[in-house]
Image (cartoon, grey):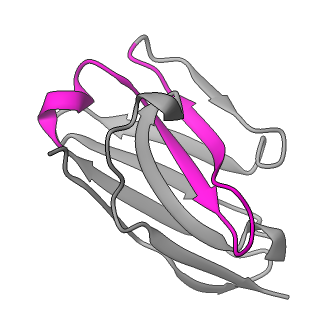
Amino acid sequence: QVQLVESGGGLVQAGGSLRLSCAVSRSIFSVNDMGWYRQAPGKQREWVAVFNTGGRTNYADSVKGRFTISRDDAKNTVYLQMNSLKPEDTAVYYCNVYPKWLADNWGQGTQVTVSS
């Protein structure tokens, strides 16, 4: 089973920053585009950002200009730098392969709570 371990979440005030990390099994990291997703209470899991194997990135409109995805191939780790956080960014954040329908299993996620 693929291992995905997210970390770095927490409670932050609006306007603050957090950096999320996701350690990924080497078996999927090297051959797949990797993305970040989030799920707020009562809502479906939504895509946030992607970093593809060609080095290109893309973001959901709701986070464009505020979030930055990166990956460290040597560490099999994906990061999400989140700046100018808003209360509507509150959610559990997950990383996984992109697109979502390719994912076999999910990690436990990391909770991000932004207070107003």
Q: Is 35 inside the magenta-drawn segment? A: yes
Residue 48 image offset from top left, x and y in percent: 65, 45
Q: Is residue 32 above or below residue 44?
A: above
On the question of residue 17 being in view, the answer is no
The residue shown at (81%, 77%) is 87
Can you tell which quarter of the image residue 22 is in? bottom left
Indicate the position of residue 15 as horizontal and vertical percent values.
79, 74
Q: Is residue 28 left or right of residue 13?
A: left
Asked if 7 appears above or below 45 in the picture, the reply is below
On-image quarter of the N terminus:
top left
Asked whether, in this view, residue 45 is left or right of residue 61, the answer is left
Counting labels gives 0
Asked if residue 50 is positioned above or below residue 38 in the image, the reply reads above
Place of residue 19 in the rendered image (x, y in percent of width and height, measured from the top left): 49, 63
Q: Residue at x 60, y 39 (%)?
A: 49
Query: Can you give x and y, in whole percent of width and height, for residue 43 in the image?
Result: 74, 64
Of the pair 4 and 54, the residue shown nearer to us: 4
Q: Kindly indicate the quadrant of the structure image that contains residue 59.
A: top right
Is any part of residue 109 visible from this angle?
A: yes
Quarter occupied by residue 83: bottom right
Magenta-colored stretch includes residue 43? yes
Say which of 116 and 2 sits in front: 2
Q: Viewed as shown, does residue 107 lie left or right of 12? A: left
Q: Split into 4 quadrants, where in the image is the C terminus?
A: bottom right
The magenta span reads 25-53
